[in-house]
Image: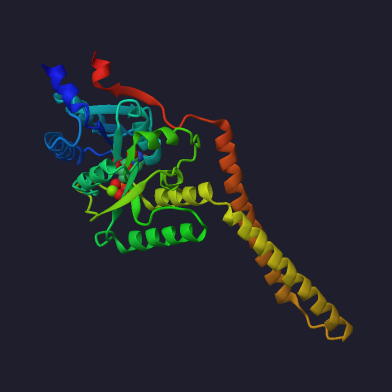
Amino acid sequence: MQSSTVTINNQKPILALIIPCYNEQEVLPETANRLLLKLQNLINDNIISPNSKIVFVDDGSGDNTWSIINDQFINNPQNFDGIKLSGNRGHQNALLCGLMSMIKFADVTISMDADLQDDINAIDQMMVKYNQGCEIVYAVRSSRKRDSFFKKTSAQMFYRFMHFLGVKIIYNHADFRLMGKNALLSLTQYGEVNLFLRGIVPQLGFKTDIVYYERKERFAGKSKYPLQKMLKFALEGITSFSISPIRLITLLGTVIFLISLIMIIYFITQHIRGDTAAGWASIICSIWGIGGLILLSLGVMGEYIGKIYLETKKRPRYIVEKILSEETLK
Ligand code: UDP
Ligand code: MG
């Protein structure tokens, strides 16, 4: 009886919602309830297969996140999966792990944050676009009214700078995104350790589209992206996708060298004219100026060399400790 229902509904795509979670005990029970309701509505409306799932990836949380995931799975193993990483690997790696774990099972995935900032009702529109043949659908914030002034301006500066450097990223899009099986399969060909999915996904190609949503405030708990992590993430994005900073240094070096040549010519003519004013200040200024630039340039070079170093090691991007899924129950 059950198998016949499954066969009929199997024509509908299997959707997997991928939710990376890091210390999200305050919000997770509510997130699980709301997502389950959404999933059931989509199943009842015959938009997705009843085998669709919500996949929580615990990114090495230190609180009760894993036990909450465990409870959800025990109550409803058909609709929940859990993956526990062996330690905190960061949002991007946790997300990648979730996507890769579903590559065989799901026809389409939607990734979103655990804190209910992303509007789950945008999922309906995303599925409409998917059914129209889109392989990738970006959910873009229609406004950032609820973000703090600092977060808003720093984020905007980041997008502008990335654009200036020639990196193709979608303005005001975080990682709330639909990806079909083909997009996921092509993502597997990107083996980089320094992961910045917002930069990689637009490079995949395929038919893509955008849906807009209003970004809400975090439902509960605190942001897991303090300033330090945000800066690291921005730097990752810039140096993983653009070598423009290195070129800028070369340009700067050339300009400074030309200026110093002009200065030398000027001082020699002054000397011939017998006009030798004590130039202590200018010398000190040049030494500090040039010294600073050299250090800055070394820093930028170091950043890239560090990247090469990490890439050549080919270390795993995440390590899975436990998996909760119907398969593991069998
Ligand atoms: N997250 C994660 N690993 C981390 C940091 C964050 O998996 O090391 C998850 C977090 O649980 C959330 C998502 O990434 O689901 C986005 O984090 P958050 O909402 O704290 O960032 P913000 O919205 O403040 O930028
Ligand atoms: Mg958030």
Res. 249 in view: yes
Q: Where is residue 194 in the image (x, y as percent from the top left)?
A: 49, 40
Residue in front for this viewpoint, 186 or 317: 186
Point 41% across, 32% down: residue: 185
The image quadrant where one finds the C terminus is: top left
Tell me which corner region of the image, top left, top right, bottom left or bottom right, holds residue 14.
top left
In terms of depth relative to the viewer, which is nearer, 251 or 178? Answer: 178
Quarter of the image that includes the N terminus? top left
Image coordinates for residue 53, horizontal then vertical, percent: 23, 30
Front in this rendered view, residue 18 or 8: 8
Location of residue 28 (image quadrant): top left
Residue at the far top in the pictured view: 330
Q: Residue at x 15, y 25 (%)?
A: 76
Name the residue nearer the viewer: 103 or 112. 103
Q: In this view, does 234 lie above or below 276?
A: above
Q: 312 left or right of 195?
A: right
**Tally of numbered tags:** 0
Residue 223 seen in this snapshot: no
| Left or right position of 247 against 78 | right
